[in-house]
Image: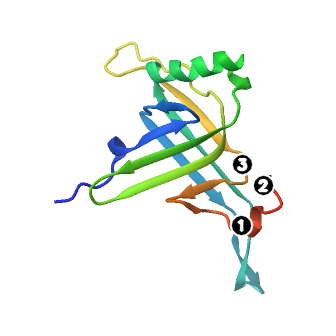
Amino acid sequence: MSTVISGKNLRFNIGDLKIVASKWTCSITDNSATNKSNGVPDGWVEGDVEASGEIELTTTNFNLLMKAAESAGAFRALPEFDAMGYGKTNKDELKVEMFGIRLKISDLLDVDANGGSALMHKIPYEVTSPDFVHINGVPYLREDEIEDLVN
């Protein structure tokens, strides 16, 4: 029987940092919509796009990120990163690249005095580059959508 990709197979890089994320999400919002004439579908229109997500880190991995912030002078001084999630098994392979990641901190502490689980830190992010997101090397956006935006 073949092994399929699970969260245990994925490894993440944020810039030059190799991060072991306890959880990582990336959601794309594409506001393209059906066009209607007299209430009847009549083609479609392109809409704006955005991508964002959240990284959950244990304190050990959070401290790696904070060392990078210290080198930058402050957390908000961190430059945008390119990030990649990659996983491979004998059956499947998945590579998700996210460009121009801008990090924030939401849940710095979420403490349960009963213990039983590692302390987690939530780091939301937004994708800020016109290169946007590539999935297995395939860009989400067409070249003509970004040609005047990419330097």
First of labels 2, 1 by sequence position: 1
Q: Residue 70: x and y, percent?
A: 65, 15
Q: Is residue 148 above or below residue 107?
A: below
Q: Residue furthest right?
A: 148
- Dot 1 crowding, Cα within 10 Å, few <14, some 14–19, many 20+: few
**Image color mode:** rainbow
First of labels 1, 3 by sequence position: 3
Q: Residue 55: x and y, percent?
A: 52, 35
Gap in Å between the C-alphas at discs 1 and 3? Answer: 13 Å
Q: Residue at x 49, y 59 (%)?
A: 136
The amino acid at mark 3 is Ser
Q: Residue at x 53, y 58 (%)?
A: 135
Q: Residue 89: x and y, percent?
A: 30, 53
Q: Is residue 133 left or right of residue 111?
A: right
First of labels 2, 3 by sequence position: 3
Q: Residue 63: x and y, percent?
A: 52, 18
Q: Which residue is mark 1?
A: 143
Q: Is residue 103 left or right of residue 48?
A: left
Q: Nearer the viewer, residue 109 or 38?
A: 109
- Dot 3 crowding, Cα within 10 Å, few <14, some 14–19, many 20+: some
Q: Residue at x 44, y 33 (%)?
A: 21
Q: Which residue is mark 2?
A: 150
Q: Residue furthest left?
A: 1
Q: Secondary structure at mark 2?
A: loop
